[in-house]
Image (cartoon, rainbow, N blue to C red):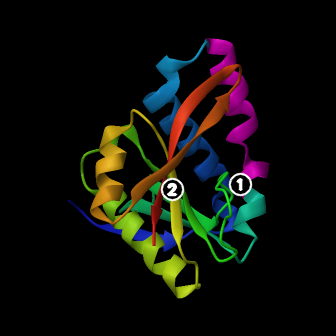
């Protein structure tokens, strides 16, 4: 693999994160939803504005992996846990997104970003750590298991009128 730069994202990166997030979500999960549900979800979730808020919050961090030309290949988002966890610990952290561009999947880029996010969460005093993952995203579940995450509960994740069965994984 040629040169790659993993860096903490800034508010200037919000358009790139929104675009890569929408592209990756649609590529990975788009076939599961009606066109209307998918388009409505992408239009409200992957906006520049929705990325600017956490990009300016010191308890949230985005990590952007770029190639030698500065093109975004993957990103991750970590911070304060917002998952529906019963009796959520006040210091709980969460891996919120780990997205790899479809052209770069299978190159261990996700692992590289995940390691950096786990380090950041630890440095910031987040404990325990959680991840929400689609119940049928077996590759992601295997990746997270390698880092000590185990299923502790489930919830429904809405995409328009559709409800995805999501697992909540925890690492103590």
Q: Which of the marked residues, 2 or 1, is nearer the chain's N terminus?
A: 1
> Foreground: 76 or 91?
91
Quadrant the N terminus occupies: bottom left
Q: Is residue 15 left or right of residue 7?
A: right
Is residue 145 a member of the stretch shown in magenta? no
Inspect this view and state whether residue 109 appears. no
Q: Which mark is residue 110?
A: none
Of residues 21 and 66, which is closer to you in this image? 21
Task: Answer yes or no: is residue 163 visible.
Answer: yes
Q: Nearer the viewer, mark 2 or mark 1?
A: 2
How far across and how far down the image is residue 25, in percent? 52, 35
| Quarter of the picture holding the C terminus | bottom left
Q: Nearer the viewer, residue 17 or 84?
A: 84
Picture coordinates of residue 78 (x, y %)?
A: 57, 65
Q: Which residue is mark 1?
A: 51
Task: Find the magenta span and give its range.
Answer: 35-51
**How far apart are the alpha carbons under marks 2 and 1?**
19 Å
Q: Residue furthest front?
A: 87
Task: Give the quadrant of residue 154.
Answer: top right
Q: Residue at x 76, y 35 (%)?
A: 44
Image height of 125 relative to 13, above or below: below
Image spot of residue 17 (x, y percent): 59, 52
Residue pointed to by mark 2: 131
Q: Secondary structure at mark 1?
A: helix
Look at 52% across and 87% down and name the residue there. 123
The image quadrant that residue 114 belongs to is: bottom left
Q: Is residue 136 above or below residue 32?
A: below
Q: Residue at x 44, y 79 (%)?
A: 119
Indicate the quadrant where residue 96 lies. Answer: bottom right
Q: Residues within 10 Å of mark 2 (few under 14, many from 20)?
A: many
């Amino acid at each position: 693999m040629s040169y790659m730069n993993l860096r903490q994202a800034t508010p200037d990166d919000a358009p790139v994160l929104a675009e890569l997030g929408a592209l990756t979500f649609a590529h990975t999960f788009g076939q599961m939803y009606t066109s209307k549900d998918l388009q409505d979800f992408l239009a409200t979730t992957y906006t520049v504005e929705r990325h600017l808020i956490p990009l300016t919050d010191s308890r949230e961090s985005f990590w952007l992996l770029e190639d030698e030309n500065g093109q975004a290949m993957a990103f991750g988002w970590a911070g304060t846990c917002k998952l529906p966890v019963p009796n959520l610990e006040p210091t709980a952290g969460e891996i919120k997104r780990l997205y790899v561009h479809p052209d770069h999947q299978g190159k261990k880029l996700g692992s590289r970003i995940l390691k950096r996010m786990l380090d950041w969460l630890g440095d910031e005093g987040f404990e325990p750590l959680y991840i929400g993952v689609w119940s049928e995203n077996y590759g992601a579940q295997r990746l997270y298991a390698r880092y000590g995450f185990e299923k502790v509960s489930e919830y429904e994740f809405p995409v328009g009128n559709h409800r995805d069965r999501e697992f909540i994984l925890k690492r103590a």
